Image (spheres, rainbow, N blue to C red):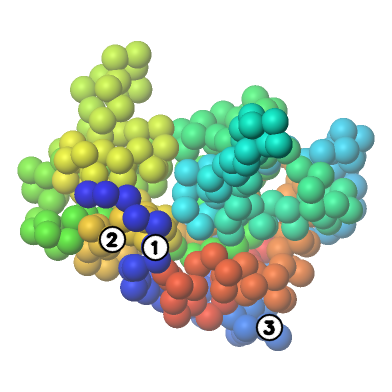
Amino acid sequence: MGVACSLTASLALFALPRTTADGAVPSPGPGPGVGKGVQVRAESAETCQNPEASLTPSTADGEAVTRIKKRGKLIVGVDQNSYKWGFRTPPTVTRQPDGSVKEIPGELEGFDIDLAKAIAKSVLGDENAVIFRAVPTNQRIAALEGDKVDLVVRTMTINCKRIQQVAFSTAYFQAGQQVLAPKSSPITGYDSSLSGKRVCTAEGSTAYEALQEKSFGAVYKDVGDGTKDDPDLLTVPNQLDCLARLQMGEVDAVVTDNALAAGQAAQDPAVELKGRPFTTEYYGVAAKLHNDDLVRRVNQVLVEYRQGPWQQAYDKWLKADLPGIAGPPAPMYK
């Protein structure tokens, strides 16, 4: 299967209503698809029901924000391989008057990149006062814990396990796990048609965790997973590696967020999403645990971002391949 960058896929992701702990749907706010904040109790590992609940917004400077301001740069972990989310454009090559060739590296672009720039502008007054660091899927949490980055803006799903490891903002996008496979494949979705099939996922992803819980007989673990002998065939460091494996015929299907898979299908018209999403997940901006002032600042940025810039970014990057989304998820607060 060749890789084509034309947007040929016609895929739909319909945002499901957010609900509170008692099952109520929060009423919409003033902007398109923007909900009022819903107050819920704090979560613990034992009682986790609303992992998307985050700290209330604030512009107050604490230790984390002060440290960033003193440095003069916000350091953000991002992806550079997820089309429409965080990807690097091709380099520009020009011939100089003396006959030499000058290559200008491509720029990072995408939905997550726009959000990271908005945070930098709020904290430092300049959207370009940001250092982007490419972080593999399986290194997102480690990058925060090791102070390699201030934030991770990288299609990172909020869940009960991860809120014990990092601090999340309120949700800024809704997605769901789905199966990506060749159009000619007999695979019909996340069901018994996966039996005996080789399925690729990114290490440390919620897709891998889903297969651990219910694999339908799929082959999804590498021999030596997580060791120096891991061949990175079925479980890979970056999600785009799965598309490459699929194109080379080394795996039969990929399980990933349908928001990411839509971008992959846009790159390769020979593949498509199969079946329907089988989970409901929310992306959040991740910070190091206890950097509460930074999380509150990001949540304040998201309050404003939901009022217009979110829709502009969606229309620019995602609408063609993920039509039908009315707006961002409503925030939930502790």
| Residue 249 seen in this snapshot | yes
On the image, the x and y values in percent for residue 52 come to 56, 58
Residue 256 vertical position relative to residue 273 in the rendered view, above or below = above
Give the Cα separation between the discs numbered 2 and 3.
35 Å
Amino acid under disc 2:
Pro
Amino acid under disc 1:
Ser
Q: Is residue 256 left or right of residue 114?
A: left
On the image, the x and y values in percent for residue 287 come to 67, 42
Neighbour tally class for label 3: few under 14, some 14-19, many 20 plus, Cα within 10 Å: some
The residue labelled by disc 2 is 269
Give the Cα separation between the discs numbered 3 and 1.
32 Å
Closer to the observer: label 3 or label 1? Answer: 1
Q: Badges 3 and 1: C-beta atoms under 8 Å apart?
A: no
Closer to the observer: label 2 or label 3? Answer: 2
The residue labelled by disc 3 is 31
On the image, the x and y values in percent for residue 295 come to 73, 50
Give the Cα separation between the discs numbered 1 and 2.
8 Å
Where, by quadrant of the figure, is residue 311 drawn?
A: bottom right
| Residue 15 seen in this snapshot | no
Q: Which mark is residue 148?
A: none
The residue labelled by disc 1 is 6
Q: Badges 2 and 3: C-beta atoms under 8 Å apart?
A: no
Task: Please report the residue visible at 64 percent of the width from the left and 73 percent of the height from the top.
Answer: 312
Task: Please report the residue visible at 13 percent of the width from the left and 51 percent of the height from the top.
Answer: 194
User: Mark 3: which secondary structure?
Assistant: loop
Where, by quadrant of the figure, is residue 310 drawn?
A: bottom right
The mark nearer the N terminus, 2 or 3, is: 3
Amino acid under disc 3:
Gly
On the image, the x and y values in percent for residue 93 come to 59, 40
Q: Quadrant of the C terminus?
A: bottom right
The mark nearer the N terminus, 3 or 1, is: 1
